[in-house]
Amino acid sequence: MHPLETRDVTAASIIRECTERGKGVETNLGKALWLDTPMIELIHGEGTIEKRIPAMMRMFGKYGIDIRKEPILVYPTLHYQNGGLEISDDCATGVENLYAAGEVAGGIHGRNRLMGNSLLDVIVFGRNAGIYAAAKAKETASPEKLTLAHIEKFNKELEAAGAASDVASPMLLPHYSRKK
């Protein structure tokens, strides 16, 4: 798999390795693959990870994992498998008064975001979504009193469907790497 493939191809490749080919490392959350992050520095030189993916390095560092020296376990989550919301050129979705940009939107590049374009999406389309949403808000009447009753209603619907859960979302790191 080419490292700059679209997210669906990347996710499918990892899933295929863990299921059809029977590879992968068993974790308490299912199988995962090792991502050889130290190899990045061996190929591209010392300091590459800190320069190119500093947020990821800091995030794992908080859990005592130095991705410059230790590989990390990876497996695609729904984030990598969905195409995102389809948006128009003014960042509007199919839901009235809802505008979207960045990782949640898939309409800019078709239904699948190209690898490495999320920052561009956030900056360019985030600004556009804000401009168009602000203009729409000026002409849109709001309810007299805003409440959080819809959240309580949703939680009751989850309970009635037997789908209620105490799992916090989103899960940034798997359980095996979390501090207790």
Image (cartoon, rainbow, N blue to C red):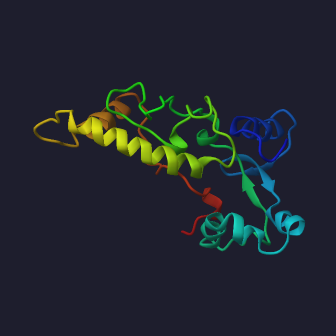
> Which residue appears farthest toward the left when viewing the image?
144
Left or right relative to 19: residue 156? left
Residue drawn at point x = 70 percent, y = 35 percent: 8
105 is higher (above) or lower (below) than 53: above
Residue at x 33%, y 39% (from the top left corner)? 133
Tell which of 50 and 34 is nearer to you. 50
The image shows residue 27, relative to residue 40, as above or below, that is above
64 left or right, relative to 132? right
- For the C terminus, the quadrant is bottom right
Q: Residue at x 85, y 41 (%)?
A: 1
Q: Residue at point 80% right, 55% down?
A: 34
Q: Is residue 132 left or right of residue 117?
A: left
Q: Is residue 180 above or below residue 148?
A: below
User: Where residue 80 appears, x then y in whole percent?
Assistant: 64, 40
**Quarter residue 73 falls in:** bottom right
Where residue 166 appears, as percent x and y from the top left, is 43, 48
Residue 109 quadrant:
top right
* Front position in the image: 36 or 140: 140
